[in-house]
Image (tube, rainbow, N blue to C red):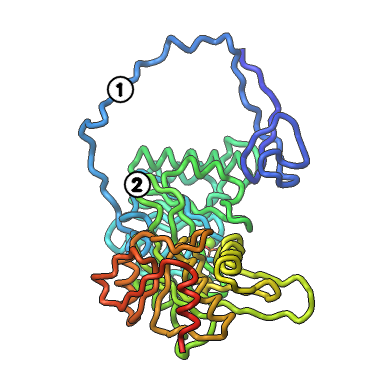
Amino acid sequence: MAKTKRRYVCQNCGSVSTRWQGQCPDCSEWNTLVEDAPATVFSMKHDLSSGGRAIAFEALDAPSEPLVRLPTGLAEFDRALGGGLVPGSAILMGGEPGIGKSTLLLQSAGAVAKRGLSVVYLSGEEAAGQVRMRAGRLGLADAPIKLASATSVRDLLTTLGTMDPPSLLIVDSIQTMHSDTIEGAPGTVSQVRGCAFELIRYAKENGVALVLVGHVTKDGSIAGPRVLEHMVDVVMSFEGERSHQYRILRALKNRFGAVDEIGVFAMAGAGLEEVGNPSLLFLSGREEPLAGSAVFPALEGTRPVLVEIQALIVRLQSGATPRRAVVGWDSGRLAMLLAVLESRCGLNFSSAEVYLNVAGGYRLSDPAADVAVAAALVSALADKPLPTHAVWFGEVSLAGEIRPVSHSGLRLREAAKLGFGIGHGPTEADANSSGLNYRGLSRLANLVDRVMATA
Ligand code: TYD
Ligand code: MG
């Protein structure tokens, strides 16, 4: 005999409690627990070891169908996906409001539809007229997209059931969808999960590539329905500073490809433009040599991206605690690097404020940035500009050694391609094929000497 129990689901992280609490015990958010549809608990005496169907086991080397991909029409989108959409799979596209998710997906929908494939774009947020106006601005007014504005999953699935399944189905956004079989308002965990489940099932059964748009909360998680991340095949994040024009599309999870490739776009008057050579974008505006600026050949997946790192040091007269502010890099890593520069190289930052910025609003996670950051810091401290045609990279250990990093050859070749002439980095780098004048560094102290020696 089945019995039911009250349960409360956190609207932020999806964790389930059996009693209401003010604060979620898992994610510590306040006032996020909401009573959910009761779960059915079966008696433990129930015997499940008979009455089921036998499952056929398969060998790993059994022949399987090759993965066919559906190009999105945007090379940068395909690159971030690892080669295009996969029919019968589901993608969650997360991003802050206003970052350009709807624009990106409409552009892709237009490109796919213009190739003669069937595309359904369902907007739960905007009226069809609004989407049509946007399509007009994007030059897609004549793309044969099947456009609708609706929020009921039942209406959508009923309609889809009367037609041939489309190649691409876009639902913008999953938080606006609701299913009448589930209690609760649209956007609650149970609604979002239930609607996504139905849509994903439809996509898998009919070989449709499904894209679900998901809003992101201020802390960067896809709002509420973290549970969705487990249900979909690919989780994408569309990021950028709204005040800067560039946008980065990256995969956070991908069952069909690597998660380290990025797609770079710039938001322009007529929609998103693809940026095939991001280095030029992040380096624009550098002309005269300025103290505190160093160029770092970063690596995003297999693609090198040159970015400028800027440091500013302000000496304090009073005994006030000096500030350390970082934009685009890890503040713990900066504290470590400052400590290594102080203890291994005898520099003194203790009575100075330190500001570090990665130009263009770019976010660095590559550990090879240490050497470039150190070069920018030493250059700012000594007020000595670094040569504008030099790049710096390498990881710094606590002992003050410069450690080798991955893909040094790729980084240096990109720098050479963009007109840089000198490379400073780990002694073990593979610099032969780059055509750059390469100068190895074995210790952080060598870097300090080299910066001090610049004219
Ligand atoms: P949008 O795709 O609506 O964002 P999201 O779906 O992620 O909420 O994009 C919104 C912003 O993009 C909007 O503030 C205006 C800007 N934009 C342009 O600059 N150029 C354009 O051609 C379009 C369509 C939008
Ligand atoms: Mg939108």
Residue 181 vertical placement versus 187 (above, below): above
Residue 337, quarter of the rendered image? bottom right
Determine the residue positioned at 69% across, 34% down: 8
Where is residue 100 shown, x and y percent of the image? 50, 66
Tell me the element at label 2. loop
- Is the residue 314 above or below the residue 103 in the image? below
Give the number of the disc on residue 256: 2
Q: Is residue 98 visible?
A: no
Q: Nearer the viewer, residue 112 or 63?
A: 63
User: Residue 421: x percent and y percent?
Assistant: 33, 81
What distance separates the C-alpha of mark 2 from that of mark 1? 22 Å
**Residue drawn at 38 percent across, 44 percent down:** 255
Question: Is the distance from the Cβ of mark 1 to the nearest ligand 1 atom less than 8 Å?
Answer: no
Q: Looking at numbered disc 2 in the image, what kind of residue is underneath it?
A: Phe
Quickly name the residue at label 1: 57
Q: Quadrant of residue 146?
A: bottom left
Query: Where is residue 121 shown, x and y percent of the image?
Result: 43, 56
Q: Amino acid at mark 1?
A: Phe
